[in-house]
Image (cartoon, grey):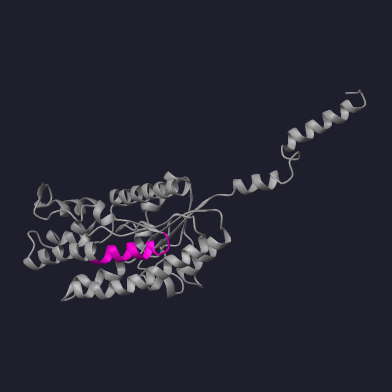
Amino acid sequence: MTKKLLPLACATFALVGTLGVLSVPGTALAASRQRQPTYYVSLGDSYSVGYQPSRGATPGYTVYVARHTGLKLVNFGCGGATTTSILHTIGCPDVLPHTTGLVTYPTTTQIAAADAFITAHRGHIGLITVSIGGNDVTACATQANPISCVTNAVKTITTNVTTLAADLRAAAGPKVPLIGSTYPDVILGSYVYPKNPPPASSVDLAKLSVVAFKALINPALSKAYASSSGALVDVTKATGGYGSLTQTVRTRPYGRIPVPVASVCALTWYCAQGNIHAKTSGYTLIGKLYVSQYHQMEKRAKS
């Protein structure tokens, strides 16, 4: 290299060293895109915002999922949402302050707001989770024929969640993990709430709830999500809801009760307060189920 060229070469190397991307066209744009966050989009009801009685919104399972996937949480969840309201109700009538990642949508529906966000950030959506359907069947516990009530509600759940999943899949594209969840069978808590020992009618209701979740609600949800290449995490099973009601365990607050009842008492507020929501331990368990399913779907996508 001649002495005349040496200063020019040094200046060029200095410029490249400072900017780091000038030698390869388009690298700066690519690096910028890589720095954009990858989002975790949550939809659903009060379970999706981590509601707990007297505490309101808590980190719930969504914060756990975000932390263990490294994704940025964007939460469209709305307390009291049903499979119908998530598709058709404008705005959220029960916005819970302090919801982590909260997004409000006063002029549109929950699904439309989520679809718009997903479409605007297509290519940067890492995960979509949905918790919906519980409020569709809650009232059935007080009906004269709970199973008939659930059977009718499941028809609506199937239609609506199939539509919901298809909308989310169309917005996100074919590869984004889409995962729905079911719920703990809190009606098992009827063994101890509001009376312990329970009347025969409460025991019968608890037994019927096992049939409702195992044979009706959860299969319907699973099929609806699968119709759009989604998956369902079976929270009912993971919280002991399918266990034998003849197997008992002694507990300090309630005496000897069925093991599945003890499990739901430990993980939710139903046995203590008649409240259907999970405790922190319950939400953490749900979060672990989501994360496990997420990693399974990611692994399959890469294989």
Camera-nearest residue between 49 and 35 = 35
Relative vertical location of residue 135 with respect to residue 40 in this rendering, above or below: below
- Who's the residue at 42% across and 60% down the image? 229
Say if residue 242 shows up in the picture. Answer: yes
Q: Is residue 185 located in the magenta-colored stretch of the structure?
A: no
Q: Which of the 4 image quadrants contains residue 138?
A: bottom left
Q: Is residue 221 located in the magenta-colored stretch of the structure?
A: yes
Say if residue 93 shows up in the picture. Answer: no
Q: Residue 163 appears at what percent x and percent y?
A: 42, 70
Q: Which of the 4 image quadrants contains residue 150?
A: bottom left
Relative vertical location of residue 244 with respect to residue 17 in this rendering, above or below: below
Q: Residue 88 appears at what percent x and percent y?
A: 43, 75
- Who's the residue at 28% across and 51% down the image? 282
Camera-nearest residue between 16 and 26 = 26
Please indicate whether residue 135 sits to the left or right of residue 302 in the image. left
Identify the magenta region. Answer: 216-229
Camera-nearest residue between 41 and 102 = 41
- Who's the residue at 69% across and 44% down the image? 27
- Who's the residue at 13% across and 54% down the image? 244
* Outermost front residue: 303
Q: Residue 144 appears at what percent x and percent y?
A: 15, 76
Please indicate whether residue 123 sits to the left or right of residue 157 in the image. right
Work out which quarter of the rendered image holds the N terminus and state it.
Answer: top right
Relative vertical location of residue 293 with respect to residue 181 in this rendering, above or below: above
